[in-house]
Amino acid sequence: MDLEQFAMYGNALGGGIVILCLIVMTVVMKQMGRDERSLLIQRKVYSFMFYVISALLLISIIFGLGDATSGLVYQRLTTVMFAISTALGTIYLIVLKIRY
């Protein structure tokens, strides 16, 4: 499978993953309430998601994906990166909720 096929299938799957993860995150955050503990957990999750998407974008810049691909493929890869960040953020939120 080449990069263009990966981007096409990842983009289609990534949109569904993002919607599902956002629904799960909304439900979990509503259950936690608005106390200091839940606000700290939410801040940690959003910070983690920012670091993940920043790292993925930096990796794409370092490996020169923009030079080797067209604009549409790079746009699809960015959507896949956002989906990965959201999925990992949802998992991290659930882990922090169970742990604390």
Image (cartoon, helix red, strand yellow):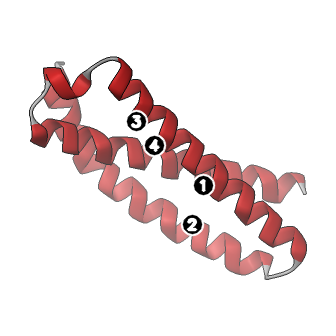
Q: CA distance from mark 1 to mark 2?
A: 7 Å
Q: Is residue 40 above or below residue 8?
A: below
Q: Is residue 61 left or right of residue 66?
A: right
Q: Residue 65: image x %, image y %?
A: 24, 24
Mark identifier at residue 84: 4
Of mark 4 and mark 3, the one earlier in the sequence is: 3
Question: Disc 1, disc 2: CB below 8 Å?
Answer: yes
Query: Element type at marker 3?
Result: helix
Label 2 vs label 4, nearer the camera: 4
Q: Residue 14: image x %, image y %?
A: 33, 49
- In depth, the one of 15 and 44 nearer the eye is 44
Q: CA distance from mark 1 to mark 4?
A: 10 Å
Q: Which residue is mark 1?
A: 90
- Badge 1 crowding class, 10 Å Cα cut-off, few under 14, some 14 to 19, many 20 or more, is many
Query: Element type at marker 4?
Result: helix
Q: Which residue is mark 3?
A: 57
Label 2 vs label 3, nearer the camera: 3
Mark identifier at residue 24: 2
Query: Element type at marker 1?
Result: helix
Q: Quadrant of the N terminus?
A: top left
- In depth, the one of 29 and 35 nearer the eye is 35
Question: Disc 2, disc 3: CB below 8 Å?
Answer: no
Q: CA distance from mark 3 to mark 1?
A: 19 Å
Of mark 2 and mark 4, the one earlier in the sequence is: 2
Label 4 vs label 3, nearer the camera: 3
Q: CA distance from mark 2 to mark 4?
A: 15 Å
